[in-house]
Image (cartoon, rainbow, N blue to C red):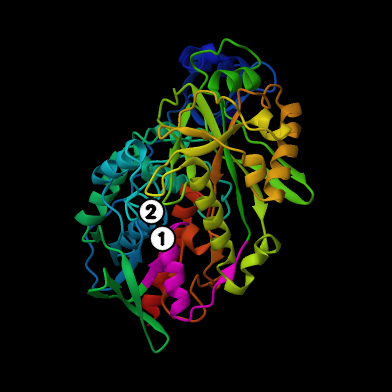
Amino acid sequence: MKRQLEIILSPDKLNDKAELLNTSAKIFKKSVEEINSVIVRKRSIDARRSPVFRLLCDVYINENPAGEENKIPYVPIKSKKKVLIVGFGPGGMFAALRLIELGIKPIIFERGKDVQSRRKDLKAIQQFHEVNPNSNYCFGEGGAGTYSDGKLYTRSTKRGNVNKILNIFVQHGADPEIVIDAHPHIGSNKLPKIVKAIRETIINCGGEIHFNSRVTDFNFKNGKAVGLTVNDQDEYEGDSIIISTGHSARDIIYLLHKKNITLEQKPFAMGVRIEHPQSLINEIQYHTKEKDENLPAASYNISCNISDRGIYSFCMCPGGIIVPAATSPGEVVVNGMSLSRRDSPFANSGFVITVNGNDTKKYEQHNPFSGVMFQQELEKLAFELANKSADGGQSAPAQRATDFVNGKLSSTLPKSSYIPGLTSAPLHEALPNFISNGIKQALLFFGKRMKGYYSDEAVLVGVESRTSSPVRVPRDKDSFMNPQIEGLFPCGEGGGYAGGIVSAAIDGENCANAAAKYILAK
């Protein structure tokens, strides 16, 4: 007999299997010998008082659990049908895997480099302040998520099978515990090997992946998507096209506009990244200065509404570092990442406010790109605030949280994880008023909810501007197809339909299903 049970354990008992057996036997009034197995299905932390783990378990009484096999049997493709995929982030990656399941060949074009070669460009931007426009924290194999944390938490549970996505990661080398954790996380040190394994699956089944291959034109014929031009010279034909370029491939958005594809401006968010000592966040969240070794570095998720605007934490990285995420010289963009151990002495998070069409009116004659231009304005401003030389630099403008609220330049800055370095700057007056005023009020509000969050130990680093794309490529809600061009499927964050690794992966699968249905119906 299988029964389900929630078991609450103190952190020191987390790995005590005997405790699981004894607790199950006691609750179900059975002997320990009658409990054949206790399998944890979900695990979360409840830190409202003293932190405890809540485990949702399947308990097998006088019965052994059936063997479970979640691996997908990817086999070589036999069909001559093929789908061209633009971008090899999670959307493009999982679209390709799903097409292989369906027996259709994916041909992928990634403007950046493979994960190993990409490391050199990340080192160049971190240590030498050199930005490669095609290979950086946003562009390259695996997309932005590969080297910016690998958080797998999503609220997109109604869009597709989240467990399937997690199990595919496990099949390619991820820790099986990501399937049970409430907030699963892989880590930027482990993701590259997993991404490489997924690449090998695709290639071994007959798919193609082309790196250093920037799409420079789309071939539309008689209202249908029939091919691509890569690097201004190489032509490729396909039965349909999936565009999964991520939130920062602005050139693709401009190219679609040039091809007379109708685009839509959409709300997005901008602000700064806030960094605290991780020990402070641990103390706030766990209500103690001494953290049990089984407890992970504490995280948080906070939000509020001020003057009808949402202000919230975004992409919170416990035990992480702030990284330079610029995609062009002359701009400063910051993001966050963590390694799998999350053992950095710092905690950082995006601290952003919603931006709408009224905020970008100065660029309204450039619609639907007014949001893009607003992003660029602040990214260039951040560069100018922190870098005196016009020929390069990735130092970021920063200000203590207390100085930001009180409207004064920080005479000193706390230690930071940001390797290119921080420059004290008056962010409070440099940022647009609605962003600056919103952040000020939110800091005070969050400081009341989390005692110690608002303090001079907290530093604001600018700018956090790539939370999502400010532009949406329209598609039909049922067919996932662009209404103007048959066989063109906008996908993931770049299309305006996802916000994170798992949601983009689900969207990739959905677009692959739609592309296959379209191809087979022709």
- Residue 487: image quadrant is bottom left
**Of helix, strand and loop, which one carries label 2?**
loop
Say if 478 sits above or below 134 in the image.
Answer: below
Label 1 sits on a secondary structure element that is loop
Q: Quadrant of residue 102?
A: bottom left
Q: Position of residue 12 (x, y in %)?
A: 52, 11
* Residue at 61% from the left image edge and 51% from the top image edge: 269
**Left or right: 445, with 324 as reference point:** right
Q: Is 315 part of what is drawn in magenta?
A: no
Residues tagged 1 and 2 counted as in contact (Cβ below 8 A) = yes
Query: How would you rate the neighbour count of disc 2 (Cα within 10 Å): few for under 14, some for 14-19, many for 20 or more?
Result: many
Above-or-below relation of 176 to 87: above
Residue 142 image label: none
- Cα distance in 3D space between marks 1 and 2: 7 Å
Q: Measured from the top left, where is residue 167 in percent x and y?
A: 40, 43
- Identify the residue at the far right of this view: 307
Residue on which the image places disc 1: 245
Viewport quadrant of the C terminus = bottom left
Q: Residue at x 47, y 54 (%)?
A: 504
Residue 263 locus on image (x, y percent): 54, 73
Find the magenta span and give its range: 241-266
Q: Which residue is mark 2?
A: 89
